[in-house]
Amino acid sequence: MRPVHLGNPPADTEGKIDWIIRALKEIEQASHDESDQFFDAFTVTNVTTTRTFDADAATVAELADVVGTFLTDFKERVF
């Protein structure tokens, strides 16, 4: 997560509530910024779109397709 600078909260109650809301939004955005950069750095090739697997019988190739599908979906922001 990137560094977040929130400043000091104001003294009045209403100002504090607004400050808290802005702070939480900033923290949320900061946590997404880094994950976007992380996932965008991957290049996935030769993937068969797969979103299901049998945990007791999956092959390495099937798991690779699941991971590849997850990375591709995330990069395209398809949820």
Image (cartoon, rainbow, N blue to C red):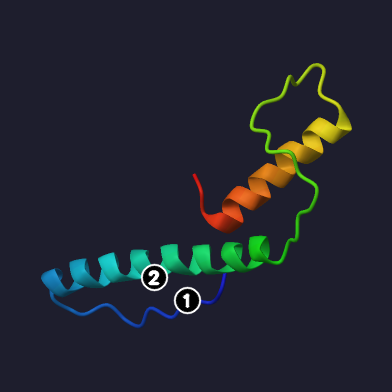
Label 2 CA crowd tier, 10 Å (few <14, some 14–19, many 20+): some
From what the image shows, is residue 10 above or below residue 18?
A: below
Residue located 65% across and 65% down the image: 40
Q: Residue 4: which numbered mark, if any?
A: 1
Furthest residue in direction right, as rendered = 60
| Left or right for 69, reference 76 | right
**Quarter of the N terminus within the rendering:** bottom right
Instruction: Give the residue type that dot 1 points to.
Output: Val
Q: Earlier in the sequence, mark 1 or mark 2?
A: 1
Residue located 35% across and 65% down the image: 25
From what the image shows, is residue 26 above or below residue 74?
A: below
Residue nearest the observer in this picture, 67 or 14: 67
From what the image shows, is residue 74 above or below residue 5?
A: above
Residue nearest the observer in this picture, 35 or 51: 51
| x then y, percent, for residue 51 | 64, 32
| Left or right for 47, reference 5 | right
| x then y, percent, for residue 73 | 59, 49
Give me the C-alpha separation between circle 1 and circle 2: 7 Å
Residue located 65% across and 51% down the image: 72
Q: Secondary structure at mark 1?
A: loop
Q: Residue 26: which numbered mark, if any?
A: 2
| x then y, percent, for residue 17 | 19, 66
Residue nearest the observer in this picture, 11 or 36: 36
